[in-house]
Amino acid sequence: MSENNTLALDVFPTATIAPVSSFIFSGFLEHLGRCIYGGILPAGPTNFPYTPRNPCPKDQFVETPKELLTEEGFRKDVLEVLRDELETPMVRWPGGNYVSSYKWEDGIGPLEHRKKRPELAWGGEESNVFGTDEFIKWCRVAKIEPYIILNMGTGTLEEALHWIEYCNGTGDTYYANLRRKNTGKDEPHNVRYWGLGNEVWGEWQVGQQTASAYATKARQWAHAIRLIDPTVILIGCGETGLNHWDGVVLDALVDKVDLHSIHLYTGFGPRDRSQIEKEYGRSVYGPDAAEYSIEICKGQINKARVAKSVNKPIKIAFDEYGVWDETVGTPENGLEQFYTLADALAMASWLNVFVRQADIVEIACVAQSVNVISPLITSPNDLFRQTIYWPLWLFSKYMRGGTSVRVALSSPVFMGETLPTWISTVKGRPTELDASAVVHTSNSGKKSVRIAVVNRSERNSYETPVRVAFSNVVKEVEVHELWHPRIEARNGWGNENEVSVTTKRAPWKGKWTFRMNSLTLLVLDIEQYMDNVPVELWMRIFSLACTDDGSTGRSLSLVSRLVRDISRSYCLQSIALSGREQLHTFAEILRRTSPEHRRIRHLFIADSRPPRKMLAAFGNLSALGNEELIRVLTLYSLSFEEEQAIWRWLSPEVKSERAEILDRSRKAFVHDLEYILQSVAPTVRTLTTHGPSCSYLLKSKFPELEELTILGFDVDLQRQTLLTTDLTQFPFLKRLHLVNNSEHFIEFVQRAPQITHLRITGLFHLGQDALDALSIALHIPPDQAAAPITPPNYLPQIKRIIIEPPTSFVNSSHFRRMKSLRRLAQNKKLTLIRPDIETTLASYTWSDAKCDWLWRIEGRKGCWRLDRLGVDRNPSTANRRSPHDS
């Protein structure tokens, strides 16, 4: 059954893939069998082991004890398992196939008025006792995010819009008021996630459609839904990820949806001992098909994004998956299937796939959450956990909240039959060992590696070296194992814990024996070598690798992908931007970069005015399209004649929107600037920027910012009223330099209580309130005639104040300010220096600012170094200074 290979498992904690989304541990509820009635609610008209197709005789009906129900009427035992044990974050409802003929308005209002309907998908009758309000109420009690699927079979767009209005409307409209009447509460249900139909491609579906017909319809629906609620997250209906349907739908919807859903089931476990090899392989190796589907779907998503220039990421919602043998779980028995150990190993491999594909899989919903091909089986007064429950519990408890990292696995391969057969012929023979890993950081900063290994061999145990790169592993390992000597073993009434997880601690010797037919989860506390190396040293190493013609950096990348992955967290630490084009390009880089790699420590944003560029540099204008011509207009500084030449080549419909185009350009620049500042705010320490940044700076928190330089003032800010309730936006700001920006002095210093060094270059708008604040900080009484009310001390930690006033003044108020400053200069903490040029504005230029920014990164004094002539800012003299002048 297997070929012998060298066994090894290598984990690379620094080679991160992406944080593991908590939504991959989501569930699914459908009006099918005993999922709702008997699972979420007490049995009602049906009861174990009866289903809507096979109703329970009245003389055999058993009531669920009231002590097992919440005050809302939900089953406590199911609720506690989903909420407290599995910590299910999201649940999909109402289907499934059921939704394609579901009329949502049948399930609201008084129970006695609700219409009973024939259920077309699975047979039987639907009482509509459990509707929208009951689902939302259950989600609130269970602390679960609701995810609702819209009826795109028999349903209409109007019905869908009414449903969303009913759930999310806050205005004085019919359906919002109807919700208030039915629930007795004003607050909306706030359903964020909405699916555009279920398996519309399937011939079993009520209202089956072709891919092109669905794409046209879904695009219209998405547009209308955004109009009624632009905040919703829309999920398009895919097939398996690798089908023609997926490509057609993605090409049409990639700019309209947020996620693309795909479905797949594996199963056909070892029910017949005489066919154990064949059936076993079909069961446990089936999830390898899902991984291939995800990879192909990712390619189709990116292809569609490129074709339509969609910048936002589109991820996968694998919102139906599971282990299902259609010959065992049938509509006649409500799709109830009792699972074996082999099925549990298949479920573990499913979860390994989702962890390895964390960069693209955002949601995964196991089908279903209770009774129907489910981890949980209930009776009127009890429940038991099936074998497939335990992998879900282990992964939810130990892999959630971690960051998926790369593993390299050398293992024997499976030589038997797989289902589908192309797993072995196209994707390649599956390995008998299957593994995923995450790095988890605790609140105290300690790191651990969690490694999930499924030994899918039905005959062989494997003693395997386990190596964690660039890390020291502590002496003990925490081991969680799901194992049983018989692969056909299962749980049931009377033997509820026949198959369950055992936990132990053991000495760590660098290897582990993974028993046949087992899931093993290892928790290893680690100390990474990288954590012991100063960041500055790594910065120096990687900066030196880029000082030649690039060959060193390319060689390092080719020699070791790991070196590239390690440097990824540091390559953006120091960034200098000049002009709108660089600003836009860097904003796009940040959008493509995962948050853990946006560790910008030092940022320089120069004047936002577009750079000058000759029109001849763009070649033949007639060969450029409208988009490229508009890009030239908005990103570069051109003469009037050059601008007119470009407008002549634009199409008439574009010319008519001239004002809108220029306005969009301005808004795009502001959006890029705000996005950059938002991205760097948590980590930036040294920031030099221009006046238009003030609006964002004064409204956001920069917890690590130590030095801030601003050149110019913000015209828009002058027309705004700033709220000053939060005065801790710059808790560690030590040095503040305002250049021709003194009118914002008070706004900044009152938000930065730790300032020790202050420099003001240019006094054109320095107000009396600022002079009074300086007086208080220097312990010199302010001019009471000008300031009858003594202001608070905004600068309690101040050590040095440097002021560079202009040498010529345009009115008498400037002379009064200079007189006040000379009075303050009696305190040695304040130094007045003479500017280089006689002008009402300071002579401090962007070249000066960049030179000072670079020196401050190196630890030099920069603009804080004084002599009688001011600061030496000539880059050619920089190397003649002492490296210890700070």
Image (cartoon, helix red, strand yellow):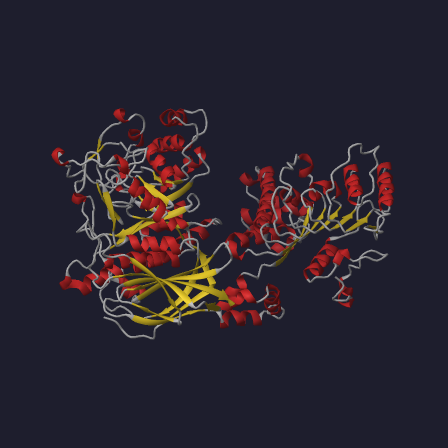
Q: Position of residue 453 (x, y in %)?
A: 34, 63
Residue 607 visible in image = yes
Numbered circles on residues, count: 0
Q: Position of residue 862 (x, y in %)?
A: 75, 58
Residue 808 visible in image = no
Q: Is residue 32 above or below residue 788?
A: below
User: In the rendered image, which quarter contains the C terminus?
Assistant: bottom right
Q: Is residue 737 above or below residue 466?
A: above
Is residue 655 or residue 794 the one in the foreground?
A: 794
Q: Position of residue 109 (x, y in %)?
A: 32, 26
Q: Is residue 527 left or right of residue 40?
A: right
Q: Is residue 245 above or below residue 231?
A: below
Q: Is residue 640 left or right of residue 60?
A: right
User: In the rendered image, which quarter contains the N terminus?
Assistant: bottom left
Determine the residue positioned at 62% across, 52% down. Answer: 704
Q: Position of residue 190 (x, y in %)?
A: 42, 35
The image quarter containing residue 871 is bottom right
The image quarter containing residue 695 is top right
